[in-house]
Amino acid sequence: MEHENDYQVIITHEGTLVFLIKKREHEPEKPFILYDGGNHATFYRRENETILLDYLDEKVVPYMQNSEHVVVFELDDATEDVFRDYSVYIKHIRKNVFTDNL
């Protein structure tokens, strides 16, 4: 599992969460987020590529708890622009074993 060290989250006027993460080499394939309602989320971007989004801002948590999807912007450091963007489904679960004890 990869740890996303430096990500940001924007809340749009419509209440949609937009996650800004670093650019990845490959296209996402059937991405989804596992979320148990706490301070951490597990982002399955593609097979064998799992990203930990930990320590969600307290303002973000209620939106995550009540959302069915988020938008992800992958940022290219070289151009300082959005490299790719896509919607990600949130699978709400009772307990996320990947984020226990964090």
Image (cartoon, rainbow, N blue to C red):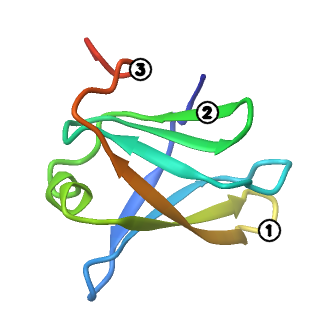
Q: Is 91 or 74 nearer to us in this picture?
A: 91
Spatial CA span between label 1 and label 3: 33 Å
Which residue is disc 2 drawn over? 50
Q: Describe residue 69's horizontal placement relative to residue 85 as left or right.
A: left
Q: Describe residue 67's horizontal placement relative to residue 54 as left or right.
A: left
As drawn, the label of residue 79 is 1
Give the percent coordinates (x, y) of residue 56: 29, 43
Q: Earlier in the sequence, mark 1 or mark 3?
A: 1
Give the percent coordinates (x, y) of residue 8: 43, 55
Q: Where is residue 35, by image quadrant?
A: top left
Question: Residue placed at 19% from the left, 63% from the top?
Answer: 66
At label 2, counting other C-alpha atoms closer than 10 Å, the crowd grade (few under 14, some 14-19, many 20 or more) is some
Of helix, strand and loop, which one carries label 3?
A: loop
Residue 81 can be seen in this image: no
Q: Among all residues in the image, which is located at the extreme bottom?
A: 13
99, above or below 10, in the image: above
At label 3, counting other C-alpha atoms closer than 10 Å, the crowd grade (few under 14, some 14-19, many 20 or more) is few
As drawn, the label of residue 98 is 3
Q: Where is residue 28, by image quadrant?
A: bottom right
- Closer mark to the observer between disc 2 and disc 1: 2
Q: Earlier in the sequence, mark 2 or mark 3?
A: 2
- Closer mark to the observer between disc 1 and disc 3: 3
Give the percent coordinates (x, y) of residue 31: 61, 53
80, above or below 8, in the image: below
At label 1, counting other C-alpha atoms closer than 10 Å, the crowd grade (few under 14, some 14-19, many 20 or more) is few
Q: Where is residue 10, by image quadrant?
A: bottom left
Q: Earlier in the sequence, mark 2 or mark 1?
A: 2
